[in-house]
Image: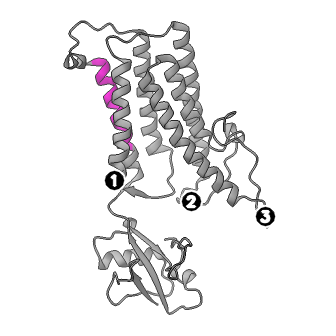
Amino acid sequence: MKVTVVSRSGREIVKGGLDLHDSATVSDLQETIHGRCKKYYPSRQRLTLPLPPGSKERPTVLNPKKKIQDYCDGNLDNLTVTFKDLGPQVSYRTLFFWEYFGPLVIYPIFYYFPVYKLFGYEGERAIHPVQTYAMYYWCFHYFKRIMETFFVHRFSHATSPLANVFRNCAYYWSFGSVIAYYVNHPLYTPVNDLQMKIGFGFGIICQISNFYCHLILKNLRSTDGSSGYQIPRGFLFNIVTCANYTTEIYQWLGFNIATQTIAGYTFLVVATFIMTNWALAKHRRLKKLFDGKEGRTKYPRRWVILPPFL
């Protein structure tokens, strides 16, 4: 079988095409491309079927686990595929580790070290109990996220663009620095004791619930990394589609009830906006896949992310 690999402009990526055995998989094709063009390792490649000129449809992405013959459409001797360079890639575990490692390290620096002298505050800093609890709460959250990254999460995609590391780190590290600065500030005014206990108590319950939601999602994915969608069920997933995002949002609400800073609430609003968009997209995707037609399961009626608001 001969496979011609072209760019979206029609230029041949591998001169003369590639000869593969009839039982070759798309993964074999990616490895062969890598052998001929060392720059393009498999996770950097996106292979699709070519579209007719002027077509507005989305191209069919070739699944690495499938055989090339599955995409030949009757012509078993020759296939043309369109190649796109996704750019430098990193594993999702690498991406998540660095975006969570920053806040985990930055926050204690503001709590333990005299950094405020650099901002002109020379006096002795009195540390309130809420500041200590906030530091433990914060570090527990990001330590939990790192542990989940390595021992709980299963990723549908092996890699992410390298540029996302810089973007995500800028987001998490910047907010982490600003929140740590204001919560640990020498002029910080703590909330009353009851409000602090309610906020942290509610937040811890949500953190534990968030961990349990991640365990449920883990069990939806097979160990071979297949990315077929399933309907999440059990616990809060019987109420909302994205219970993991719901508990993530509410755990930061608890943190902000206890600490009450503008920086913290700004982070909460931005994070809620981002996760709501993700949740809406996933909700629509699941409803489309599980539409109840032709014997398919019908997606149950649920809130999307934030009952009773959405």
Q: Earlier in the sequence, mark 3 or mark 1?
A: 1
Sooner in the amino-acid sequence: mark 1 or mark 2: 1
* Drawn side of residue 250 relative to residue 300, left or right: left
Q: What residue would you read off at disc 1?
A: 163
Residues drawn in magenta: 97-112
Answer whether residue 101 is magenta in the image.
yes
Kindly report the distance in space between the C-alpha atoms of the residues bearing marks 2 and 3.
Answer: 22 Å
Question: Label 3 neighbourhood size at 10 Å, few (<14), some (14-19), many (20+)?
Answer: few
Residue that label 2 marks: 227
Q: Name the residue under label 3.
A: 293
Name the front one of labels 2 and 3.
Answer: 3
Q: Quick check: marks 1 and 2 in contact, CB under 8 Å?
A: no
Q: In this view, does 257 lie above or below 26?
A: above
For the residue marked with disc 2, what is the amino acid?
A: Ser
User: Pointer 2: residues within 10 angstroms few (<14), some, or many (20+)?
Assistant: few
Q: Element type at marker 1?
A: helix
Q: In this view, does 137 lie above or below 96?
A: above
Task: Check disc 3 and give the amino acid type.
Answer: Lys
Specify the amino acid type for callout 1.
Ala
> Could you tell me how many numbered marks the image carries?
3
Percent position of residue 227, x then y: 56, 59
Decide which of tag 2 and tag 3 comes sooner along the chain. 2
Which residue occupies 54% across, 28% down? 251
Residue in the picture at 51% in, 84% down: 23
Label 3 SS: loop
Mark 1 Cα within 10 Å, few/some/many (few <14, many 20+)? few
Residue 259 is situated, as x and y percent measured from the top left of the image, at 46, 17
Residue 161 vs 59, above or below: the answer is: above
Quarter of the figure with residue 45: bottom left
The part of the image, by quadrant, that contains residue 32 is bottom left
Q: In which quadrant will I find the C terminus?
A: top right
Main SS category, magenta section: helix
